[in-house]
Amino acid sequence: MLIQLLILVLLIALNAFFAASEIALISINENKIKVLAEKGDSKAQLLANLLEEPSRFLATIQIGITLAGFLASAFASEAFAGRLVEILHVMGVTVSAGVLKPIAVVVITLILSYFTLVLGELVPKRMAMQRSEQIARFSVRALTILSFIAAPFVKFLTVSTNFFIKVLGGDPNADEENITEEEIRIMVDVGEQKGTIQETEKFFINNIFDFDDKVVSEVMTHRTNVIGLSMDLSLAEIINITSEEKYTRYPVYQDSLDNIVGILHVKDLLKYINNNQGKEFNLSEIIRKPFFV
């Protein structure tokens, strides 16, 4: 009895291993793995090789999960159905063994399904979502070996899958759909709720998409409307212009607006006036370096 239970636990654990590995490999940061692989990380290199052909490792994992589930169900029915019938007879149930055995098989299958679902699927998958990299690293060597062993079966399954996809009108070679702007916004919202993305980061990311919907006139000033300052202007003229226009920054040009030589910040002008009263005015001393895009 103990040996049968240990075998059943082993099969459920095997199911859990494959289920956790599947979610871990799907959830892992592929770009991070590529960087680590380039730095010589051996496990990252194995992971990168697996991730290059996701259909291959997914098929290998699916074979493992299917076999573990079938074997567990068949073994449990064979090992425990007869014992359950004996227990029922001892308890005084007078129904014949021929009737009780199918019922016992159903009961055992339901009990096994519960433990397989919770311990072999839900728990390992939840843990894999939280610790994707650690679990992926733990399982990568075994999955690499199993992928090599299962290669002929995977090839057969891939050919079969592609055939049925074509029959159903699909394209087996079609790329996955691109992530849309709305999906990225949703991921950013979820990231903010979980605390992985700050509010300011969310603001900047959303602004990137909003910026794409703006026309140039909303964010830039037409050349004919630009208020610039000539290098030849006197201090009084500059004060007069800045007082009338009330901007905080002005482009400074030499000869024409096509030759911008600096940017004047009004706060720099006020500081200069306050600290250099009585001295000869020199605009080049207070303008800042312009940046061109």
Image (cartoon, rainbow, N blue to C red):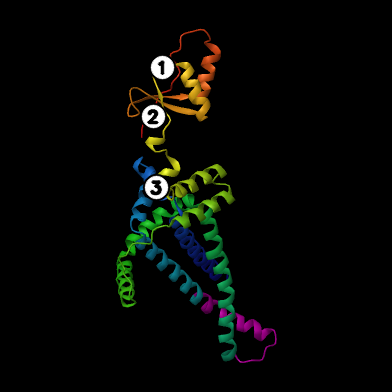
Disc on res. 291:
2
Is residue 247 visible in this depiction of the protein?
A: no
Q: Nearer the viewer, mark 3 or mark 1?
A: 1
Name the amino acid, label 3.
Asn
Helix, strand or loop at disc 3?
A: helix
Residue at screen point 37% across, 55% down:
51
Quarter of the figure with the N terminus: bottom right
Foreground residue among 10 and 150: 150
Residue 160 is labelled as none
Amino acid type assigned to the residue bearing label 1 in the image? Ser
**From which residue to which does the magenta span run?**
75-96
Taken as a whole, is the magenta stretch helix, strand or loop? helix
| Pointer 1 residue | 284
Res 250 quadrant in image: top left
Q: CA distance from mark 3 to mark 2?
A: 33 Å
Q: Amino acid at mark 2?
A: Phe
Q: Which residue is the site of mark 3?
A: 31
Label 2 residue SS: loop
Residue 3's spot in the image, x, y percent? 54, 68
> Any magenta on residue 85?
yes
